[in-house]
Image (cartoon, rainbow, N blue to C red):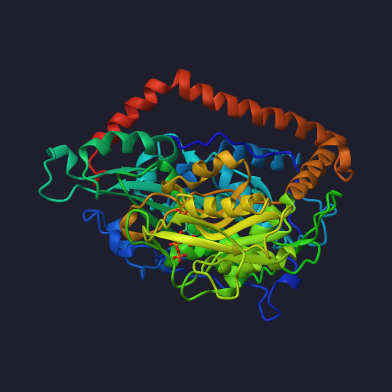
Amino acid sequence: MAFITPFAPSLSRTPLRRPRSTARRSPHASPTLPRVRMARTSIQPDELDVAEDSPRDAAFSDPQHDLPDADLELEPPCVGDFLHSPCLQEYKEQREAGLVSYSLYDLPDDISDVWALAVGPSKATELKNQYSRFGVLIEHNFADFASAEGCTDAFRNATIDEIAFAKAKAVYDDTGMPAIAEFSDMTIEPPKSGSNINKTMQQGYYTRLVDTEGDAMIDRVRPISDANRMAIFKSAVAYYDGEMHVVVQRAASVAMAFASAYHVTIAIASALDELFKQLSRRLNLTFDSPENSKWRAEDGEGQSEGKRLVGATMLKERLLREGKMLSDNIIKVSSFVNHKVDTELMEVCGEELAERLRHTMPNKILTVESTGLIAGLPTARTLGIPLVFARKSRPITISDSYQTTYRSATKGTMNELIVSCEYLEAGDRVLIIDDFLAGGSTAEALFKLAKMAHAKVVGVGVLIEKMMDGGRAFLSGYDVPVESLAKILPAGDRGRIMFVEEEAWVPPFVKKQRSEGEQEGEEGAGTERSMAMLEEEDEDEEGEEGEEDVGVIRWEDEEEEGVLDELEENLIREHGRR
Ligand SMILES: O=P(O)(O)OC[C@H]1O[C@H](OP(=O)(O)OP(=O)(O)O)[C@H](O)[C@@H]1O
């Protein structure tokens, strides 16, 4: 049974690990860091009691359940036997043959460590960006771990945190680099008692091949499930550096009506986020490089220096923790956005909205009282432009005004919007900022006001976009960029908020610099590396592409039948018998 993701690391890049810089560590840290015991908490521990007949899952549902001490000395039994990564094996062989050297070439000063990964490709990109800002260069990703031939039982009997840990440890053992690894599974809970369901369907379903089998399994089970039946995605992430290990688990439950394999990313993102928090504290990974701490506008297009963008990340993290769906499309964020306001969070959100929309060259922010001001003010301040907010009732100080009406999505009432002719002028380039985008009627009303003033709306930015209300499509006719920091998916998951996972946004000029940097690197900028190494690298890059193609062809043409048979087997497998 394989869980291969078609992704190959660039084996021939020199595997480097600079001796750990103490500069980034706490001055009080002892040279041998203590081992960390992590309580394995889940987002919704109360919702994880679905697999009554599984001692593993019972343990998982207990937030206090720690790895037993024996695990801390892992080598877990059979771990080396039941896991195998062809790419890591190849790397190991190259290393043993002396083809990859550990000589340290000039790493940038702001890099203090080089790590490796064993995670899915999209998460790898995110982690690379995230950790690079903290002085960690992520150099390899061994995403092709699979259960070794003949080790199916050992693999099934291992918990997901054991597997994540085993992957991290295997990568560390074979590369010498600290490693982060991930492993996830999906459970479809048994139907509620009394459901009209035949015997084989009473136990629920389970897979560890979420990427490849998850959707097919959900599609098969959904028609025989009631709307409240849950698919539970669990993810374990582990870090190991030879001295210390940290293991974190998180879970996300999604109603079958909305579930897709994609939702495993919620559990993965949440676990990785917690892992990052733990590691940044334990390893004192500080964001201390002046080079990194600012985005630099060097494209000559008039973009000013902006700050590092963490608004979307922090907002999503907060949504995950505190946001609630009160109904299908009413979102409660009153503890940090629109009643009690987390001003620091709004500050970084405003900064990110400003940087995302800076290219529209606005000279004015237009928003609506009162909650539009929450995101509007920091955005305006970052851009250094004034803010005008439309009033919902006419102040006695306003005589000449532009005025329109719109229907409030949340209240269902018709509202007036009024802006003084003094403050919206012909030729203004207006950026609309609001807390929410739902159906788009509020933003459209602001478009109308701008039009009355012969001003031009150049963009729309919101903190939170409710994907189910179609505001983006509604506004598409205006043909302006629409940016949102968090895109909320339709309700589900017992009041929990779910959002679309997106790659971190980076300014176009930074992207350009990075791709130019990469090209330079490929074209021989790595002067410290031997010609032989560069040639190998070229070959590997060809190999990477080749392998991805093969992965696709194999699924579609050669092994499709086999995979479907296996899926069929999994579907009829009772939950407790994995
Ligand atoms: O895209 P839409 O469908 O127009 O919805 C978005 C608007 O809904 C909310 O305002 P609301 O109408 O509830 O008024 P409030 O800000 O006074 O609560 C929110 O603050 C946005 O302005």
Residue 363, x across and y down, in percent: 74, 58
Q: Residue at x 66, y 72 (%)?
A: 284
Percent across and percent down for residue 366 are 62, 60
Observer able to see residue 403? yes
Is residue 244 shown to the viewer in this render?
A: no
Is 186 left or right of 369, judged from the image as shown?
left
The image shows residue 496, relative to residue 8, as above or below, that is below
Specify the quadrant that holds the N terminus: top left
Residue 64 lies left or right of residue 123; in this view the side is left
Where 347 sits versus 60, above or below? Answer: below
The answer to which of 563 and 314 lies nearer the viewer is 314
- For the residue pair 532 and 460, the one nearer the viewer reads as 460
Residue shown at 64% from the left, 36% from the top = 90
Image location (x, y in percent) of residue 254: 34, 51
Number of numbered discs overlaid on the protein picture: 0
Q: Residue furthest right?
A: 527
Q: Quadrant of residue 180?
A: bottom right
Does residue 350 sit above or below 257 in this rendering?
A: below
In this view, the residue farthest toward the front is 399
Left-right relation of 451 to 532? left
**Quarter in which the C terminus is drawn:** top left
Choose between 117 and 311: the one closer to the eye.
311
- Point out residue 158 in the picture as x, y percentages from the top left corner: 38, 50
Residue farthest to the top, as pictured: 557
